Each structure stands twice: as structure tokens, then as C-alpha cells.
Amino acid sequence: MRLFVAAELSDELIDALADTSALLRDAVRGRFVAPDLFHVTLAFLGEVPAAQVDEVGMYVRSACEEVEPFATSLGPFGSFGRVSSAILWQGFSSGRDHWDFLAERVRAALRDGGFSIDEKGFLPHVTLMRRADLTHGTLPMPCVARGSVDAVILFASDLSGERPRYEALERIDLL
Ligand code: ATP
Ligand code: MG
């Protein structure tokens, strides 16, 4: 199974991200992520044998025991990749220490459990578009909001269909 661990965003954040996405539709060509799929990836595991999924859940649960819910605010846009075919995302302007702590706890627990994760540095962001053409036009001002991160989800990602399907295997409340 293709697994990743993500933070669940509160409704205030999802709503503002959806508003940003709607503004982008008039300004940028590319492939839009549907708002029901918005998330922040904390750790990407990739293929893990089905028999080890419970174990992954156990490590993620133990990491979350050390983390409290936290407030965070949406911030400016950022992008990865080529300007003609970019990943366009919205980042966070506050709560960054909390984001780093959460991601580091989850990553360290998975590493200690012997799982290999993508070791690129963590940069909290929500992908809004893929293959975005940023070569002309100007980006709108992103909608911002303050909200919270109250839970972490272990997802299985199924990329066989027309759009990705994420199945929540386990949802862990931060307490
Ligand atoms: P698609 O690949 O069809 O565009 P997707 O990227 O949403 O869809 P996945 O590739 O399964 O679906 O990725 C799930 C999450 O993990 C996304 O947030 C994605 O950005 C992130 N991710 C995917 N591959 C990596 C990787 N190698 N390193 C870090 N994060 C990754
Ligand atoms: Mg992908």
C-alpha cells in the first residue's frame, strides 16, 4: 500500500484554501486539487506491505502522544518545479515551530520503527495545483485564515483512478 501521514486541517483553514483555489481558477491554468483532498503531508512512506500497516499506525500513534493541538495561520504561495509546470501551494505564516515539532516526532518514530520515509526537509504546505503554468499573468492574493491542527491521519493513497483517492486508515486526535 502507498502510505503517507498527514495533518488534518480545521474547517477555517480548508474554507480559506478553497477560496484561494477559486481565485486561482480565474488566473492560472493547470490541474486543481479538489478541496476535499487538501492536506499537509508530514511523512511520505510510499509502498509498505499490507501486513505492516498496523505497525505503522502504532508508531504514528506513539509520536502523537507527545504533541498537543496547535493554532496556525495560512500564509503566502510557494511553488516547486518548473514555472511552466509547477506545483503551486499555500504555506503557513504562524505555527511553524509547532509544524516542525509535529513532523519531526512522526518522522523520528517511523525511522525508529525501521520504516524508510522521504527525507527531504519538511516544509508545511498545502498543494492547490499541479502542472500550474506560472509563466504569465499574476497570482491573486491568497485567502488567509487562522485555524488549528487537531488530528493526524494515516492515509493509503490509490492512484489507479482518474483522480487520487486517499483512504483514512487511522485518525489520531492530538490531545
Ligand atoms: P498524484 O501523484 O496523482 O498527483 P498525490 O501526489 O496527491 O497525487 P501521492 O503521490 O500518493 O498522491 O502523494 C500523497 C502525498 O504525499 C501528497 O501530499 C504528495 O505531495 C506527498 N508525496 C508524494 N510523493 C512524495 C515524495 N517522494 N516525497 C515526499 N512527499 C511525497
Ligand atoms: Mg504524487
Image (cartoon, rainbow, N blue to C red):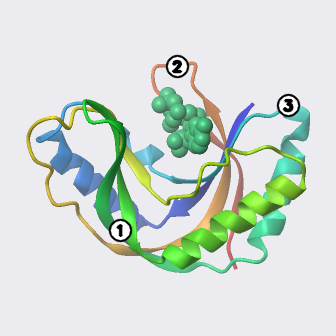
- Within 10 Å of disc 3 (Cα), the crowding (few <14, some 14-19, many 20+) is few
Note whether 150 is above or below 46 in the view shown.
Answer: below
Q: Locate residue 93 relative to residue 133 in the image: left or right.
A: right
Quarter holding ligand 1: top right
Q: Quadrant of residue 49?
A: top right
For badge 2, the amino acid type reads: Gly
Q: Locate residue 133 relative to residue 54 in the image: left or right.
A: left
Q: Earlier in the sequence, mark 3 or mark 2?
A: 3
Q: Quadrant of the N terminus?
A: top right
Q: CA distance from mark 3 to mark 2?
A: 21 Å
| Residue located beneath label 1 in the image | 74
Q: Earlier in the sequence, mark 2 or mark 1?
A: 1
Closer to us: 168 or 1: 1
Query: Do callouts 2 and 1 mark residues in contact (Cβ within 8 Å)?
Result: no
Q: CA distance from mark 3 to mark 1?
A: 35 Å
Q: Locate residue 96 relative to residue 22 in the image: left or right.
A: right
Disc on res. 49 = 3
| Residue located beneath label 2 in the image | 161
Q: CA distance from mark 2 to mark 1?
A: 30 Å
Q: How many numbered discs, if any?
A: 3
- The nearer-to-camera label among 3 and 2 is 3
How far across and how far down the image is residue 44, in percent? 66, 44
For badge 1, the amino acid type reads: Leu
Q: Earlier in the sequence, mark 3 or mark 1?
A: 3
